[in-house]
Image: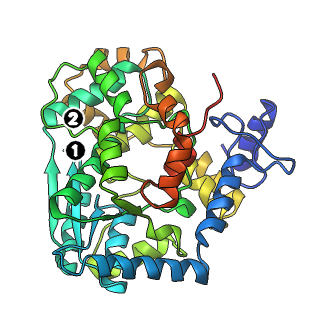
Amino acid sequence: MNIQEKLNKIKSRHLQVCSRCIYDETVSNIYFDEQGVCNYCLSSDELLEQYNTGKEEGRRELDRIMKQIKHEGRNKKYDCIIGVSGGTDSSYLLHLAVKEYGLRPLAVHYDNTWNSAIATENIRKVLSKLNVDIYTYVVDNKEVDDYVRSFMLAGVPELDAPTDIAAPEILYRACGKYGVKYVLEGHSFIAEGVSPMGNNYFDGKYIQDIHKKFGKVKEKTYPNMTFYRFLKWTFFKRIKKIRPLWYITYSKESAREILEKEYNWVYYGGHHLENRITDFTHSYYNPIKFSIDNRNWSLAAAARNGIMTREEALEIYCTYLEVDKTLLQYVKKRLELSDEEFERIMNIPKKSFRDYKTYKKRFELLRPFFYVLAKANLVPMSFYIKYCFPLEKH
């Protein structure tokens, strides 16, 4: 399907499309202003202004924060924690922190046992050359697989939600163990946007409820983040989360060039595809079962921020997502699913986080509290934007 055919298809369904990015009205919780610009673009504009992204003021503020981190950590072995996955953003953040700011980070990796060989090797290459220590937490693979199966049986799209919750919990635990007060995160709203709410939700209660209903393996090593633990790390321990890429001009393409040149780092082919369960979720499970194309997030962000034209983003979005048949077979084999069982799961009625217990209402009730935490860098501003406001009913 070419760009014009895609646009014609949208028009034939009488769908409104954002005049600036490529989101249309099928995107969860979207609305448009009088100029036809969607709320996700408007939220991005607010973040640009708030963080002075790419401006001298933004760079000065980041310099100030980095100096403060160095000062507060001067008598400690490590002055900050950086989560690593082998992907572009976290690898580049390590490079930036050490080479440009002279920080002494501890790299922390949550190993959900679904890593690709490329990701594992990328981590080794970058850490070895930068002489950075790593703390790795390896969860029991039987538990991980049980969580994946549970989410499939629950009929929801967030198969990697257990990882998305466990990874920050491990970062916080590392902070507690080594007395570190700063976590640096390699996220860029310019490159990735803020994912639409409604098909990408996760919190500790959501994880608990789905596993209680559909899981079979007892939890022993899985590090869930309950609401109490969340408050413990953010409010009581006062561990700050800093996203340096929110302050500076950042390009994934330029970052990859630096990583390839400096560390012989290898690209893995797509957004978050360094992990095989995420690769399966993005390339097969979500597109086939839910008609969700997760490329939409980064492509919309690229269009709204001028990284590529709207037409270029649509052209990529219109390309067919090819399924790696070897990956599909690997997932079936690892999860111990026959072809018949897998097909039955793929045909389970579609559900969402609204069908299970979550902390969502609690986050909404405590919105003023979380706004204060976000302004103090104790929770990411994107958490406040995504989780603390009511959503449209479906």
Q: Nearer the viewer, residue 326 or 298?
A: 298
Q: Residue furthest right?
A: 34
- Label 2 environment density (alpha carbons within 10 Å; few <14, some 14–19, many ≥20): many
Residue 227 found in image quarter: top left
In the image, what residue occupies the spot 16% across and 23% down?
217
Residue identified by numbered label 2: 144
Apparent side of residue 143 relative to residue 306 in the rendered image (left or right)? left
Residue identified by numbered label 1: 112
Q: Nearer the viewer, residue 393 or 228?
A: 228
Q: Quadrant of the N terminus?
A: top right
CA distance for labels 1 and 2: 7 Å
**Residue type, numbered disc 1:** Asn
In the image, what residue occupies the spot 23% across and 81% down?
74
Q: Nearer the viewer, residue 128 or 220?
A: 220
- Label 1 environment density (alpha carbons within 10 Å; few <14, some 14–19, many ≥20): many
> For numbered disc 2, what is the local secondary structure?
helix
Residue 165 found in image quarter: top left
Q: Quadrant of the C terminus?
A: top right
